[in-house]
Image (tube, helix red, strand yellow):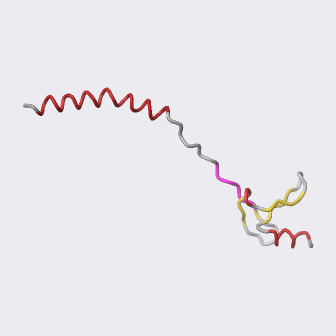
Amino acid sequence: MRLLPIILWVAVAIVLLLPLLRRVLAASPRPRRSLPDELVKDPVCQTYVVKSRAIRRGEADQVRYFCSEECARLDAGR
C-alpha cells in the first residue's frame, strides 16, 4: 500500500518536470553544423585537395589550387 503513493508522486513529478526539461534543452545553444569544404583538383598531379588547405596561385578571375608548393612551382615552370 505504501508503494502506490510513491509511484503516484513519481508519475506526477515526471509529468510536471518533463515540459520544463524540454524547454531548458531547447533553449540551450546547439553547435553549428559547418558545411563540408569543397574539393579542388590540382592541375599538375591531378589529386583532389580540400579548398581551404590548398595552395592558391593566380589572379582573382583565374585562381588555381595546388596540393603543395612543389606542384605550384612545377606549374609556374611550364
Q: Is residue 43 left or right of residue 6?
A: right
Q: Nearer the viewer, residue 29 or 66?
A: 29
What residue do we see at 82% from left, 59% from top? 56
**Lateral position of residue 23 relative to residue 38, left or right:** left
Which quarter of the picture shows residue 6?
top left
User: Which secondary structure class fits the magenta region best?
Assistant: loop
Q: Quadrant of residue 12?
A: top left
Q: Read off the magenta span.
A: 35-40
Image quadrant in which you'd find residue 57: bottom right
* Callout count: 0
Please identify the residue farthest to the left as the structure is shown. Answer: 1
Q: In terms of depth relative to the viewer, which is nearer, 60 or 12? A: 12
> Residue drawn 13% across and 31% down?
4
Residue at (73%, 56%) from the top-left corner?
A: 52
Quadrant location of the C terminus? Answer: bottom right
Q: Quadrant of the N terminus?
A: top left
Q: Is residue 12 above or below residue 46?
A: above
Left or right, 28 with respect to 36, comes to left
Q: Position of residue 55 (x, y in %)?
A: 80, 62
Please provide percent x and percent y for residue 74. 87, 73
Nearer-the-camera pick, 26 or 39: 26
Is residue 10 rendered magenta in the image?
A: no
Image coords of residue 68 (percent x, y): 78, 68
Q: Is residue 78 above or below residue 35?
A: below
Q: Position of residue 16 (x, y in %)?
A: 31, 26
Which residue appears at 75% of the width and 60% of the height? Answer: 40
Q: Nearer the viewer, residue 41 or 11?
A: 11
